[in-house]
Amino acid sequence: MTGPLLLSYYGDDFTGSTDVMEALASNGVETVLFLDIPDEALLKRFSHVRALGIAGTSRSETPEWMKEKLTPAFAWLKAQKAAICHYKVCSTFDSSPGIGNIGTAVEIGKQLFEQAFVPLVVGAPQLKRYTAFGHLFAAYQGEVYRIDRHPVMSRHPVTPMHEADLRRHLAGQTKLSSGLVDLVTLGLDDADARIDALAESADGMVLFDVDSPLSQAQAGRALWRLTPPQGWFVAGSSGVEYALLAAWKSQGLVPGAADFPAPGKAERIAVVSGSVSPTTERQIRTAASQGFEAIAVDPLDLLGENGERVMAKAIANGLDVLGQGRSPILYTALGPSADRGGEIDRIAGSRHRLGQMLGAMLHRLVAEARLTRAVIAGGDTSSHALRQLDVQALTTLLPLPQTPGSPLCTAHGLNAATNGLQIALKGGQVGADGYFAQIRDGLTAA
């Protein structure tokens, strides 16, 4: 890479990884997201960027997987010598000791980077996520809920959140201690001295509260001020980037804005969805009135002994819709009431396999109908589906400032059908009701 990298990162799922890329690119920090550790030739193609990331799947993996896979990934990122190396987690912080263990990832990074403590920033007002006195809050349908009372995240099918105090939540995942820089401390006249004193004695993790643009800027200033000359490892949501951007802008390190022309309308797109979120349910139902055709695919049939036949039928149905000039949505659930998670989990490796099968279906639709734009809905689904499209890297094509976290991206790779594909990866809770039509029409606002 030429010139100093401001930031490198590892995203614990693909939608979260594009969330970080969007935040940086929107503020003039050119960023590339790789799907694996790149070879020298691929890295050289993006030698102009000031931030780079690796999109991972650790949010849906075990601690044993993390120890095997995150260690070389973090080591490669460290070798890029960015000022900040960020382990990116979901802004809802949903995780458990056995799946998506954030504590394990922090332990690996802390040891590899040889630092006394790892800073944590989770609050991101841009995403309507807030931390106050160590507790996490998130919005849903215009109301803000403590995360353990959130209508969706408290009932997440894999990692439901039953504790809002993030330090207590982490205590179930790691023996590392957790300090806190709370809102009161951030606002004090001698905040720098108090934070320095905490940093000198910290041994584990230190969480910075963020509940507003003001506290976000204060946290970002502290994070950047404390960054050692050799760089360091931090963890948290894309709130890390939003906080740092405020500090970088104040020092003139980044432009603070970038121009992204609207790409125009695509006559047809294809969508695959493995999300059980009520947000995605509303989006699918809304899209059905906006020129899309919703096609149900039974996940248990897909995973069964006749799965290849079920997949072939779904692809044929999708191609038929595309042939009529409309856009198909192939989905495995329509909201929480259709969640078959309990039955699916009885089949070993089924959740990963479902994502892979949805990705294979999307690849066929894109290749055979020669589509230029597509969407994958569902955080875990995106992580496993996108790999089926032979994509090596993503860059931001169109940020969506009204619903940040789900930008339209450009895919880069060696496969002729998907190189240059415009694709959006949408987390279950992300986007307005008209999201799919927004992507089809190439609009910045739904």
Image (tube, rainbow, N blue to C red):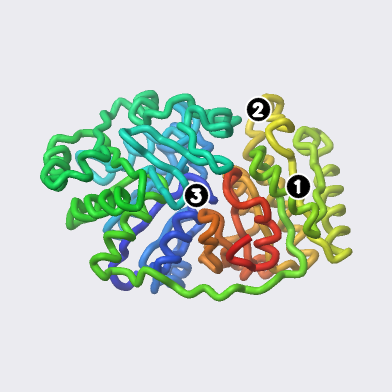
395 relative to 222 in the view: left or right? right
Q: Are marks 2 and 1 in contact (CB under 8 Å)?
A: no
Between disc 2 and disc 1, the foreground one is: 1
Q: Is residue 272 visible?
A: yes
Q: Amino acid at mark 2?
A: Asp
Element marked by disc 3: helix
Which percent across, then down, holds residue 249?
Answer: 30, 66
Q: Please tell me which residue lies in front, 5 or 236.
A: 236
Element marked by disc 1: helix
Q: Are marks 1 and 3 in contact (CB under 8 Å)?
A: no
Marks 1 and 3, how far apart at CA: 24 Å
Which percent across, then down, holds residue 395?
Answer: 51, 66
Within 10 Å of the Cα at label 2, are there few (<14), some (14-19), or many (20+) other Cα atoms?
A: few
Residue 107 vertical placement versus 34 (above, below): above
Tell me what residue is drawn at x 48 percent, y 24 percent: 162
Marks 2 and 1, how far apart at CA: 27 Å
Marks 2 and 3, how far apart at CA: 24 Å
Q: Dividing the picture into quarters, in which one does residue 28 lie? A: bottom left
Pointer 3 residue: 16
Within 10 Å of the Cα at label 3, are there few (<14), some (14-19), or many (20+) other Cα atoms?
A: many
117 relative to 435 in the view: left or right? left
Tell me what residue is drawn at x 51 percent, y 41 percent: 139
User: Which numbered disc covers residue 345?
Assistant: 2
Mark toward the start of the polypeptide (2 vs 3): 3
Q: Please tell me which residue lies in front, 295 or 187.
A: 187
Which percent across, then down, holds residue 366?
Answer: 74, 62
Pointer 1 residue: 285
**Quarter occupied by the C terminus:** bottom right
Q: Please tell me which residue lies in front, 143 or 35.
A: 143
Element marked by disc 2: loop
Mark toward the start of the polypeptide (2 vs 1): 1
Q: Dividing the picture into quarters, in which one does residue 91 lie? A: top left
